[in-house]
Image (spheres, helix red, strand yellow):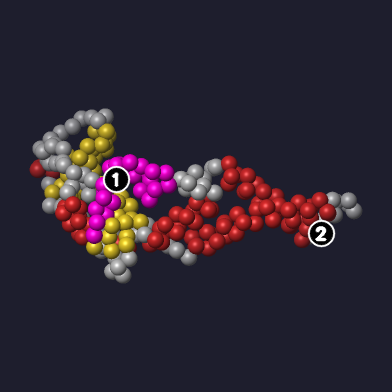
Amino acid sequence: MRNIVRNTHKYLSFFISVQLFLWTASGIYFAFNKIELVRGEQYRLTESFPINFDEVKFSRSDVQQIKAIKRLDEIIFVLSGSKGIEYLDAFGTPVNKLNKNEVFEIVRSSSTLEPINLEEITESSKGSEFRGRDLPLYKVTSLNDKDKKINLYLNVFSGEITAVRSLQWRIWDLMWGFHIMDWQTRDKINNIFLKIFSILALVSSISGILLFFKVDYKSR
């Protein structure tokens, strides 16, 4: 019986050793990097603003959620309801997409970064930096105070910064893919590979414990 346990532990450990290494390495990276810094919270600037509802000249009854956002020098309203998501000004008129100069002004006032390039994204791609965000988006390539490139993703109508992506975030994202064994989308934490290797790792651990205590079922 001891030989069976020993061989099980030996070959299982060899088989899953690479993934165990990746789990350990990614776990160490997660432990030594604050998630707030990975998400780029240190680059964001927050600003409060008053709202005079007497200046709102429209009403709607088919709205499930409404949010007020300051877009440059005006307050706009983001409505979610039967018509989907709408971006309206105080008179209920749909707002236009922001232009390049407006986007750059928003980046400078809403972050500590300096914008250098603008690109509109209209199509999603698997495993992208902006996955999970509504399209279209503006991708603004910017520089921090150390002249390192940081990508900002902004809503094309409201100017909200929906994501901040840096090299630190890309390493985190890669490590996360290794950790959950989803190397493409890096979102599926219940995939079959993770389940199989988790069970194998558990069996390997149990067999190692049995060997440590030198359990010999035959002698018992």
Q: Is 5 positioned to the left or the right of 160 in the image? A: right
Residue located at (73% from left, 53% from top):
11
Figure quadrant of residue 17: bottom right
Magenta stretch in the rendered image: 115-140
Q: Is residue 173 visible?
A: yes
Q: Is 110 positioned to the left or the right of 22 in the image? A: left
Q: Residues within 10 Å of mark 1 (few under 14, many from 20)?
A: some
Circle 2 residue: 214
Q: Residues within 10 Å of mark 2 (few under 14, many from 20)?
A: few
x, y (%) of residue 197? 62, 48
SS state under label 1: strand
x, y (%) of residue 211? 78, 58
Which residue type does callout 1 highlight? Ile
Query: Looking at the image, which is closer to me, 220 or 107?
Result: 107
Circle 1 residue: 121
Residue located at (18% from left, 32% from top):
60
1 vs 2, front mark:
1
Q: Which mark is residue 176?
A: none
SS state under label 2: loop
